[in-house]
Image (spheres, rainbow, N blue to C red):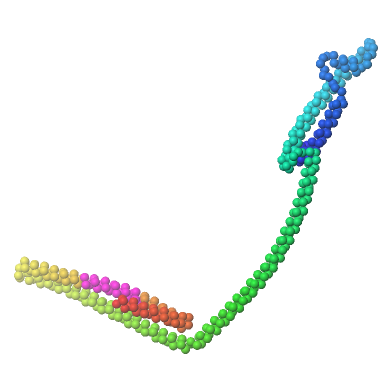
Amino acid sequence: MTINSKSTKAEILAAYKELDKQKKSLESQLKNSPKVNPITNKNTTQDIVRKSIPTVNINSNSTKGISNTIQALAEIQSSFGGAVSNLSEHLIVEATQLETVRNAITLEKLELIELHKLEKVTESTIDDLIKKYQADSKKFAEELNQQQESDRQEIETLKQAWAKEKETHSRFVKTRNEEYRKAQQREKEEYEYNLDLTRDLDEEEYNQQTKLRQQELESSRKILEKQWQEKEAEIAKLEQEYSTAQEKVVAFEEQLRAKIKQANEEGKGIGNYQAKIKADLRAKEIQGETRNYQLRIDSLEQTIEHQESRIRKLSQQLDASLQQVQDLAVKAIEGSSNRNSFEAMKAIAMEQAKTQSKGK
């Protein structure tokens, strides 16, 4: 049996027992075999021949036979020496293997003692450990089966409980959804009923309020149009003033040229010095008046630009207000905003009126 690092304890023990049996057999054979002394001189062969062959009378006729016998004995001696040498080598190998096995057995015994907390290892220790292992395995298998059966029953119980809980939850959800649907249906019917009732009861009042709102919207529109006309009149007046100022500037320029010409003519009659002084003074006066008129023209142009900008803004505000008024009127007519729409529309109209008043 071959022993290696992967061999089990049972295999090692069986190999040990087999080697021990072989050892005892070899020892018995060695004890029973005759002792052989080493050959130390040249007379060994002759001694063996003397001991092995009976004494006979040698004559010339038997010399050749004796020589053949001696040669045969020498060959036997050589073969016997080789056999003894091989046997010695074999015994040395067996002894070495036996020592290795003994060391391995010693290590295994130490491991068994340490692993299983044993006091000592005997021949029955392995059998006892195997029996104990089998008993423990059987016990563990029984406990495992019991635990598996217990777990299976527990899982089955949990499955049944879960199925029951799931069914209960499904019934609860179904009942809740049905109640919610009925409640929604009742609320919808009540809302539609109240809405129809409110429309029927307030139709006349709603028509009156709508008429009043339209009147107020018309009044607001007229106020805005009046403000717009006033702004247009104011702008027209400013344009007229601007045109007048331009005409005056042109007239002053012509007057300036005439005065200069007149001053030149008068200077010829009165004197160059006095004419020059008067011409310079008059030119400065005309230049000052021209500058004054030019400043007025610039101021009027800025005023006109400012008014045009305000007119554009007012136009945008008016368009936005009219759009809001129209939207609110539509909502009011459709009945979606009721009193809140009217109040919002009225507030917008008042805000626009205030804005126009501040713009003046």
**With 286 as the anchor, is 162 left or right in this view?**
right
**With 185 as the anchor, is 149 left or right in this view?**
right
Could you tell me if residue 5 is visible in this image? no
Place residue 155 in its image quadrant.
bottom right
Could you tell me if residue 158 is visible in this image? yes
Q: Residue at x 36, y 78 (%)?
A: 351
Establish if 360 lies above or below 77.
Answer: below
Locate the C terminus and report the quarter of the image it occupies.
Answer: bottom left
Residue 271, image x, y percentages: 5, 68
Q: Residue at x 51, y 85 (%)?
A: 198
62 in magenta: no
Q: Nearer the viewer, residue 325 or 49?
A: 49
**With 314 as the anchor, is 270 left or right in this view?**
left
Locate the N terminus and report the quarter of the image it occupies.
Answer: top right
Residue 7, image x, y percentages: 75, 40
Residue 200, image x, y percentages: 51, 87
Instruction: Specify start and end residues of the magenta stretch as a single range.
Output: 295-315
Establish if 254 lies above or below 195.
Answer: above
* Main SS of residues in magenta: helix
302 in magenta: yes
